[in-house]
Image (tube, rainbow, N blue to C red):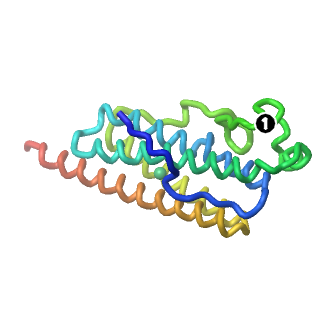
Amino acid sequence: MWLYEKKLQYPVKVSKCDPMMAKFLVEQYGGADGELAAALRYLNQRYTIPDKVIGVLNDIGTEEFAHLEMIATMIYKLTKDATPEQLREAGLGTDFVNHGGDLFYNSAAGVPWTATYIAAKGDPLANLYEDIAAEEKARATYQWLIDYTDDVDLQDSLKFLREREIVHAMRFRESVEIIKADMGQKKIY
Ligand SMILES: [Fe+2]
């Protein structure tokens, strides 16, 4: 059960129309290491994870949806004043023709989102290591995005998201240690 709070987790400001940057940001909307994949990956893993760490998956999976909202807001603000010509020049012409102003779950290269992005191995440690890797990949992607823009307002929001990925990776690492300690206690020689 979720309660919806009608505000973004962190403010999103952009200082200029930049459809090319919007195209790159789509990677974090519907790409392999994007926010949709993260949210669905963690929330789906809750049903087999030991009770001690289920809250971590709940918290982070939910927060990833808040990040998805932030990415969508960035893309909207970066493109809302763009002309069809500017969208075409940024490589968003086919998106515009197909979806109008709506977003679609695909990568920056236009590959549709797929459930194969989501690890579900039925083994808590295997799943958590996958989660740590996913967070590190998301952190790296945010770094490339920060490097790609000179818009300090956009950079500020992206830096917030990058920092959250670092915190998520740390919490998953802690969960691995908790599960390993529990496994060690159950050994009978
Ligand atoms: Fe994350």
Relative placement, left or right, of 142 versus 189 is right
Q: What residue is at 30 percent from the left and 51 percent from the top?
A: 176
Q: Nearer the viewer, residue 160 or 108?
A: 160
Q: For the residue marked with disc 1, what is the amino acid?
A: Asp
The quarter of the image holding the N terminus is top left
Where, by quadrant of the figure, is residue 96 drawn? Answer: top right
Report if the beta carbon of the residue with label 1 is closer than 8 angstroms to ligand 1.
no
Residue 14 x/y as whole percent: 69, 60
Q: Say above or below: 66 vs 144.
A: above
The residue at which mark 1 appears reads as: 95
Residue 166 x/y as whole percent: 45, 61
Q: What residue is at 56 percent from the left and 64 percent from the top?
A: 159
Q: What residue is at 65 percent from the left and 46 percent from the top?
A: 27
Relative placement, left or right, of 35 versus 95 is left
Q: Nearer the viewer, residue 129 or 62?
A: 62
The quarter of the image holding the C terminus is top left
Where, by quadrant of the figure, is residue 41 drawn? Answer: top left
- Residue at the far right in the pictured view: 85
